[in-house]
């Protein structure tokens, strides 16, 4: 039950930091704890990164697409017009097709959803994956209308 509760916190903010939560094997957990104890010294401060493990490898080509893409890693100050410029004239993203996600306190989450004219257009727009807005790399993911609606309704609370 605790694992399920923790996994619900995946891709949320802890204070001002964005965190991802992963399941792992007990062996990986014990290795991370051992590394912390070994490197922590007398003050028990965590100084070294946990043992490396492969990141979730997601082949975005194999994912199911709709006309909506999710953007992650956006600057908190991003505006709809910035996102439109990010995609450029080739995609001609109008501000009313950009939905920036906000927390219940009104602060941006660093995510947004963009509606394209078609599924094919959304797939083409994936060429912008890992390009920058300012100094931030922007990750793009296929999304669906229900995910965008849920994010929008969370923003209104």
Image: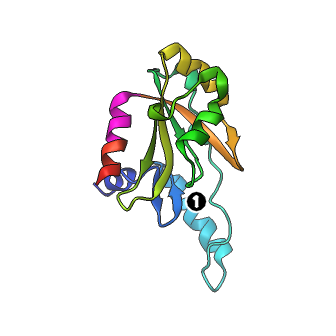
Which residue is depicted at the point 39% across and 28% down?
Answer: 144
Q: Position of residue 54 (x, y in %)?
A: 62, 42
Picture colour scheme:
rainbow
Q: How many marks?
A: 1
From the viewer's side, name the closer residue of 56 and 117. Answer: 117
Q: Quadrant of the C terminus?
A: bottom left
Q: Which residues are magenta?
A: 144-150
80 or 100, nearer to the observer = 80
The residue under the point 39% across, 50% down is 7
Q: Is residue 102 above or below residue 45?
A: above
Mark 1 residue element: helix
Give percent across and percent down for residue 85: 64, 35
Q: Is residue 147 magenta?
A: yes
Q: Percent from the top left, x then y, of residue 106? A: 40, 59
Could one spot residue 129 in this view of the protein? no
Q: Is residue 70 above or below residue 33?
A: above
Camera-nearest residue between 7 and 95: 95
What is the x, y in percent for residue 18?
52, 56
Residue beneath disc 1 = 31
Residue 15: say if magenta: no
Prevailing SS of the magenta stretch: helix
Instruction: Quadrant for residue 61, please give it.
Output: top right
**Residue 36 appears in the picture as rendered:** yes
Q: Where the N terminus falls, by quadrant?
A: bottom left
Name the residue at 57% across, 49% down: 78
């Amino acid at each position: 039950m605790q694992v399920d509760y923790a996994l619900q916190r995946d891709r949320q903010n802890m204070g001002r930091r964005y965190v991802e939560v992963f399941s792992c094997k007990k062996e990986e957990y014990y290795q991370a704890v051992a590394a912390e104890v070994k490197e922590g010294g007398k003050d028990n401060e965590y100084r070294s990164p946990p043992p490396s493990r492969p990141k979730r490898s997601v082949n975005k080509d194999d994912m199911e697409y709709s006309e909506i893409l999710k953007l992650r890693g956006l600057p908190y100050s991003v505006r709809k017009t910035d996102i439109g410029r990010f995609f450029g004239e080739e995609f001609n993203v109008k501000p009313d097709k950009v939905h920036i996600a906000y927390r219940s306190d009104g602060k941006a989450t660093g995510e947004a959803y963009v509606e394209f004219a078609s599924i094919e257009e959304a797939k083409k727009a994936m060429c912008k994956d890992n390009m920058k807005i300012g100094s931030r790399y922007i990750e793009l993911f296929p999304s669906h209308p229900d995910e965008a609606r849920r994010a929008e309704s969370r923003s209104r609370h």
